[in-house]
Amino acid sequence: TFDVRAAHCTVASDRASIESQVTALFSGMEDKTAAPLPSAVDDGEVVLQRFEPLQEDPLVRFNAFIRGNLREFVISQIGDELSVPYHICLVAFLPMIFYSSVNVLGCDNGPCASSAKLESYRSVSAYMITQTVGWFLVLVL
């Protein structure tokens, strides 16, 4: 589970800065409306929340927001870890797809004839086909 106090900071002074920002954003305010559900955001419109003073630790409120409202919104937009939509997976794999194309078409950063010969292929076309099938299997599986 998420906890802002357990966040790892490379620079020690960042922790104090982050906690002071979170405290400034979440201090002394209580949500008077029901927690906005993911369906409350429609066509770019965001439901504004009304707040009233509250006597609770702002870091605890921030953690609850991250674990609750923000988590539910992200899951509604992207899906949970077991049901990510296919188009989101493709976007995540784009760097690997582009790299595989560069790797195959670039013949391992050398002339295609010498790369094929170094890897004991009879022809450049056999080398290219094998590389393409190999990358395809890696990306699909």
Image: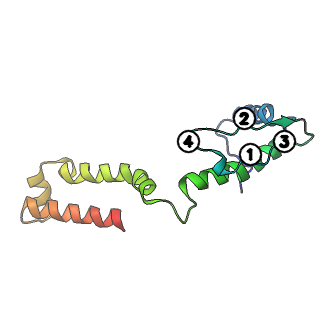
Residue at the farthest right position: 55
Decide which of tag 2 and tag 1 comes sooner along the chain. 1
The numbered disc on residue 15 is none
Secondary structure under tag 3 reads loop
| Tag 4: amino acid | Asp
Tell me which numbered mark, 4 or 2, is placed earlier along the sequence: 2
Residue 20's x, y, as percent? 78, 32
- Give the residue at mark 4: 43
Residue lying farthest left? 123
Mark 3 residue crowding within 10 angstroms, few (<14) / some (14–19) / many (20+): few
Element class at badge 1? helix
Q: Residues within 10 Å of mark 1 (few under 14, many from 20)?
A: some
Residue at label 1?
Answer: 4
- Quadrant of res 135: bottom left
Instruction: Give residue 14's position: percent from left, percent from top.
Output: 69, 34
10 Å neighbourhood of mark 2: few (<14), some, or many (≥20)? Answer: some
Which numbered marker is on residue 18? 2
